[in-house]
Amino acid sequence: MLRDSGKDWEVVELDLDPPKSGELLVRWVASGLCHSDEHLRHGDIVPRFPIVGGHEGAGIVEEVGPGATGWEVGDHVVASFLPACGHCRWCAQGRSNICDLGATILEGCMTDGSFRFHENGDDIGAMCMLGTFSQYGVISEHSAVKVDKEIDLTKACLVGCGVATGWGTAVYSAPTEVGDTIVIFGIGGIGINAVQGASHAGATNVIAVDPLANKREMAEQMGATHAVASAEEAMELSQQLTNGVGADKALVTVDVVTPEVVENAVNVIRKGGRVVLTALADPAKATVQVSGSVLTLFEKEIVGRLFGGGNPHLEIPKLLGLYQAGRLKLDELITKTYTLDELNTGYNDLIEGKNVRGVLIHEH
């Protein structure tokens, strides 16, 4: 858990309430080390502290609360960091990635404002109402997606955030069309899956942009046709590949969004092209600063997307089906696994660019 911004992750023992109406007790098996949790430590995103980290998890149902229908002890689940009620305005429109229940994901409480983790009588939050860095968690059934028991949960956890977000950014939010030239800025846990998605959707050229050689090499292994170290190289290459027209879409999946990367993304796309922002930064900072005249005169678009624009309860099983069919790579994404007491090491490795995705394996 984190007690405040700027502090390290701590391993502590907490009290956990039993599941209440519509809730599940889950024994977490694995959790991806997503950069969003590390944003809390660095102050890029400020939740209610203290908070149990982790939102990209997979586990096994140990107890079913009253009123939680369709669930049994022993069911395997992948957590959706965005709960979906199924009947608010947004869910009814097929946009469950912005379901109204998501309003409390940084408060760490359940939708009724109550908490399930406690320490010496004090309420402790759970990242995205999940807290998958804990060995056990009580979560809403709206945050749980039942998955095939044959799938390795240490791999399946990745589709709860990074894989689905990156894939959706390329496939749905761009959207990538057959023959497109796609430029992807930042090849981490989201960007690498944007590479997979763009390749799968039929892009002719997939240009991965990252200053780190290991990330560029990984991108080429996952479907990128080209990998370059800088925005300048991406601009030159995209012009060459399109006879001076420019890239069709640019996807911003860097660790922290800056005005510079947004400007580079806008510059690299053609007339009528689209920039998709999936990466995050401090919400109080203005990170989109481009010429409005350029947007108007060349009809360029900048759009933001959460979870890649996909619907969690639909996308998670779909992506795992692709994995089982051998058409989506998950095993190859995992650079290294960590135990609970190695969490700070895992995030330091992420910050230093050593990992595409680290995975925390819980030991019971």
Image: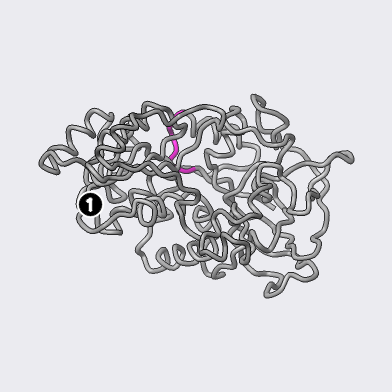
As drawn, is 127 to the left or to the right of 214?
A: right
Picture coordinates of residue 44, whole percent (x, y):
57, 30
Badge 1: residue crowd in 10 Å (few <14, some 14–19, many ≥20) = many
Is residue 356 a member of the stretch shown in magenta?
yes
Q: Quadrant of the N terminus?
A: top right
* In the rendered image, the vertical position of residue 66 relative to residue 79, given as above or below: below
Colouring style:
one colour
Residue at 48% x, 62% y: name it: 315
Can you identify the residue that label 1 sits on?
A: 180
Q: Amino acid at mark 1?
A: Asp
Picture coordinates of residue 346, whole percent (x, y):
55, 36
Q: Which residues are magenta?
A: 352-357
Instruction: Tell me if I can see residue 312 in this picture.
Output: yes
Residue at 57% x, 63% y: name it: 91
Picture coordinates of residue 215, whole percent (x, y):
35, 37
Residue at 56% x, 69% y: name it: 149
User: Which quadrant of the view contains residue 119?
Assistant: top right
